[in-house]
Image (tube, rainbow, N blue to C red):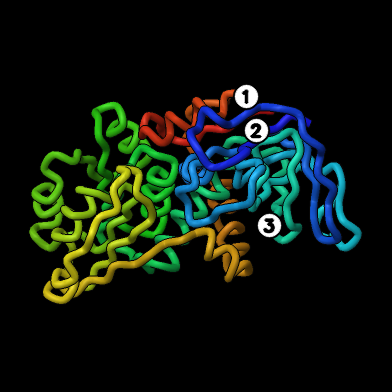
Amino acid sequence: MKAVICDGFGPLEQLRYDEMAAPTPGPREVLLRVEAAGVNYPDGLLVQGLYQMRPEAPFVPGMEAVGEVIATGAEVSRVKPGERVAALLNLGGYAEQALAHEAAVFPIGEMDAGDANALLVAYGTSHHALKQRAQLQAGETLVVLGGAGATGLAAIQIGKIMGARVIAVCSSPEKQQIARDAGADEVIGYDALKEDIKTLTDGRGADVVFDVVGGAAFDVCSRAMARNGRLLVIGFASGTIAKLPVNLTLVKEYAVVGVFWGNFTKHEPAVYGANMEELIGWYQTGQIKPLIEGRYPLAEAPEVLARILNRGAVGKIVLLP
């Protein structure tokens, strides 16, 4: 089969699109013929050796895939060959075939492949962040950094479902319009971030900040939190890991909360499964709708990853074998 192969940590350009042996499912594994593989920011970090997980090379990146079940292990009972599913993976999505544990496979019927991929990691991360980690309450103010990215758009839509007032932060007028179209109540830029948050909250500050950016934006938000607020640390798209003056959390009485979605799915699979059921239900009723920016050939994975790492993408991107 064809796959995108990482022979060792290094620049994205070192990824090669080549032939490799197709995998064989273990007792509780499912083998998919991949229809579409989702692209995520951590994929680009992973192949450069910059992510929390450091798999042994060679490996195939890719945390999620949608496709048809073509084989199952002897102990698999949840799905059968011929079913169309979305699958959460450890690795291996950037290929014509991929393996997933049966517990991480979700039947999707006729759902669009791009949308199904988006629900797995992007919406899954935002849902976990707002529901379990922030415990977002109706009537609270949620500030979403990176509001036009896949996770940012998910946070806007999920925040609205949960009853929050959502302020989206985006770097350009074009991205601001995308966030507005997704349902954000207010849309602002980064230039006067602290002042805008204070103005829009009548001086209270943000109850919850959803931060996938880090760097200077984190510094600003750490000074614009409401009492009893929750500052969610989700990622560092700016390329800079900020340092927190902890005296701010004491004086302003807010919490800084880490969100590591991969750890969550590993340690609380039943809760993740329930989250996915809720997301699929919201999708089916039209309450959430991913923005799919583009669908690209699998061989273009290095170029697509470079765009995402350089913050040049909006919404969700998928690769097509």
> Which residue position is annotated with label 1?
299
Q: Characterize the local packing of mark 2: few (<14), some (14-19) or many (20 or more) Cα atoms within 10 angstroms.
A: many
Q: Secondary structure at mark 2?
A: strand
Q: CA distance from mark 3 to mark 1?
A: 26 Å
> Could you tell me residue 213's position as x and y percent?
31, 47
Picture quarter with the C terminus: top right
Identify which amino acid the numbered label 2 is placed on. Answer: Val
Q: Earlier in the sequence, mark 2 or mark 3?
A: 2
Q: Secondary structure at mark 3?
A: helix
Q: Are marks 2 and 3 in contact (CB under 8 Å)?
A: no
| Residue in the image at 53% along x and 65% along y | 264
| Residue in the image at 67% along x and 44% along y | 92
Residue 89 visible in the snapshot: yes
> Could you tell me residue 285's position as x and y percent?
55, 47
- Which is nearer the eye, 20 or 94? 20
> Which residue position is annotated with label 3?
104
Q: Are marks 1 and 2 in contact (CB under 8 Å)?
A: yes
Q: Characterize the local packing of mark 3: few (<14), some (14-19) or many (20 or more) Cα atoms within 10 angstroms.
A: many
Identify which amino acid the numbered label 3 is placed on. Answer: Ala
| Residue in the image at 83% along x and 51% along y | 25
> Can you tell which of label 3 and label 1 is closer to the viewer?
1
Q: Which mark is residue 4?
A: 2
